[in-house]
Image (cartoon, grey):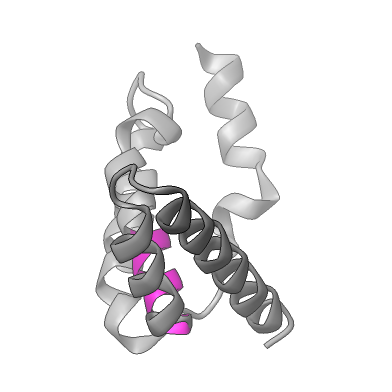
Amino acid sequence: MAGGRRDRESDPDASTTLPVPGPCASTQRALAECHRRAARGPLQPEVLCRHLNRALAECVVTACCPDETEAVRTLCGSSGTALKRTQCQRARIDLSLCLEAHQDS
C-alpha cells in the first residue's frame, strides 16, 4: 500500500489545479480536499472522490456549454424514435465541438 501512496504523492498532476468557472469553484475545493484526505487513507482518491470528480466535470461542462449540455440531457435521456436517436447523436457532436472550442481557452 505504501507504494500506491508514494505514487499518488509524487504525481505531478495531483498538485496542479486548473481554474474552473465561478459556480464550480466550491466543488473544485471539495474535490481537492477529498484528494488530500484520501492520500492519508487506504482508498485510492479515484474511488473515494469519484462523486465529486463527476460533479465537478458536469459543472464545468454545463458552465462552458450550457445549451449543448441541456440538449444532450433532453434528447439522450431515454431511447426513442429513430429521429430522436439522430437528434441525440447530433447533440452529442455539438457538445463535443463546443468543449473542443473551450479546450484552448
- For image coordinates 69% across by 76% down, the residue present is 103
* Magenta-colored stretch includes residue 61: yes
Residue lying farthest top?
Answer: 1
Please determine whether, in this image, residue 37 is positioned above or below residue 105. Answer: above
* Magenta-colored stretch includes residue 67: no
Question: Which secondary structure class fits the magenta region best?
Answer: helix
Q: Position of residue 44 (x, y in %)?
A: 43, 27
In the drawing, does residue 65 fall left or right of residue 41? right
Q: Position of residue 18 (x, y in %)?
A: 56, 73
In the drawing, does residue 31 fall left or right of residue 91? left
Residue lying farthest right?
Answer: 104
- For image coordinates 47% across by 81% down, the residue present is 65
Q: Would residue 67 be seen by someone viewing this image from the given angle?
A: yes
Count of numbered circles on the image: 0
Q: Position of residue 62 (x, y in %)?
A: 38, 75
Q: Position of residue 32 (x, y in %)?
A: 38, 57
Give the extent of the magenta segment. Answer: 56-64
- The quadrant of the rendering that contains the C terminus is bottom right
- For image coordinates 28% across by 44% down, the residue present is 51
The quarter of the picture where residue 84 lies is bottom left
Taking depth in this image into account, of 104 and 26 the one nearest to the observer is 104
Q: Would residue 17 be seen by someone viewing this image from the given angle?
A: no
Please determine whether, in this image, residue 27 is positioned above or below residue 11. Answer: below
Taking depth in this image into account, of 44 and 97 the one nearest to the observer is 97
The quarter of the picture where residue 99 lies is bottom right
In the drawing, does residue 49 fall left or right of residue 19? left
